[in-house]
Image: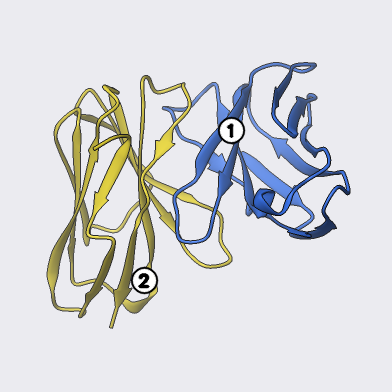
Amino acid sequence: ETGVTQTPRHLVMGMTNKKSLKCEQHLGHNAMYWYKQSAKKPLELMFVYNFKEQTENNSVPSRFSPECPNSSHLFLHLHTLQPEDSALYLCASSQGLFQEQYFGPGTRLTVT
Amino acid sequence: EDQVTQSPEALRLQEGESSSLNCSYTVSGLRGLFWYRQDPGKGPEFLFTLYSAGEEKEKERLKATLTKKESFLHITAPKPEDSATYLCAVQASSNTGKLIFGQGTTLQVKP
């Protein structure tokens, strides 16, 4: 595997389900990010982790819960989501906080 | 408030017809401006980083430039494979690595 990988690529879940998104980076980077991309809206930062420590929470609702067990892995735990949470969720990584970010292919999430 | 505006929203070109995409920004101290390319169903692909006014970077048919208020992505003699959405993002010197993205310009190059 190379670059940034995300699983699953597609996910359909009901509003009462609990699911998790997984991201893994194979670039030796120290910072990892979650972004949300909705139709007709700019990419929106959700969370930032640097050396496993959360450095930014962009006022994200508590139904989204991130976890970063090490610098290579990032999870986004989902529970009791709303239909408006349907979007493309993108993971990214960078060597440092102020360097270019490399994105994974994303998870297309549909909440029914 | 930090903000990025891209124009036009959509651009159609004939193969070989050069043009420019615009990214206007307001930010409290620019640390860097980033250009990405995004194909449908994929994550953004990094193209360039620009750090200071007057800086230019080139890659194949693409050239990015930066002033104190805006950046341009010049596309010279585009080919159909250049069709994609081009995203601009800024990083402020005051924040924690956060990128603020524009809404993108969707480019279609017809053969």
- Mark 1 belongs to chain: B
Q: From this view, report whether residue A80 is shown above or below residue A49.
A: below
Q: Colour of chain B?
A: blue
Q: From this view, report whether residue B41 is shown above or below residue B49.
A: below
Q: From this view, report whether residue A52 is shown above or below residue B104.
A: above
Horizontal side of residue B108 vs A28, given as left or right: right
- The residue positioned 65% from the left and 32% from the top of the image is B27
Q: Colour of chain A?
A: yellow
Q: How is the image coloured?
A: by chain
* Kind of residue at disc 2: Ser
Q: Which residue is mark 2?
A: A86
Q: Nearer the viewer, residue A102 or B60?
A: B60
* Kind of residue at disc 1: Leu
In the picture as drawn, the residue positioned furthest to the bottom comes out as A112
Pick the quarter of the image with the C terminus of chain A: bottom left
- The residue positioned 45% from the left and 61% from the top of the image is B41
- In the rendered image, residue A56, in percent from the top left (x then y), is placed at 34, 36
- The residue positioned 79% from the left and 55% from the top of the image is B8
Q: Is residue A88 visible?
A: yes
Pick the quarter of the image with the N terminus of chain A: top left
* Discs 2 and 1 carry the same chain letter: no
- In the rendered image, residue A29, in percent from the top left (x then y), is placed at 30, 23
Label 1 Cα neighbours within 10 Å, binned few <14 / some 14-19 / many ≥20: some
Q: Which residue is mark 1?
A: B47
In the picture as drawn, the residue positioned furthest to the front comes out as B111
Mark 2–mark 1 distance (CA, rounded to whole Å)? 28 Å
- In the rendered image, residue B47, in percent from the top left (x then y), is placed at 58, 33
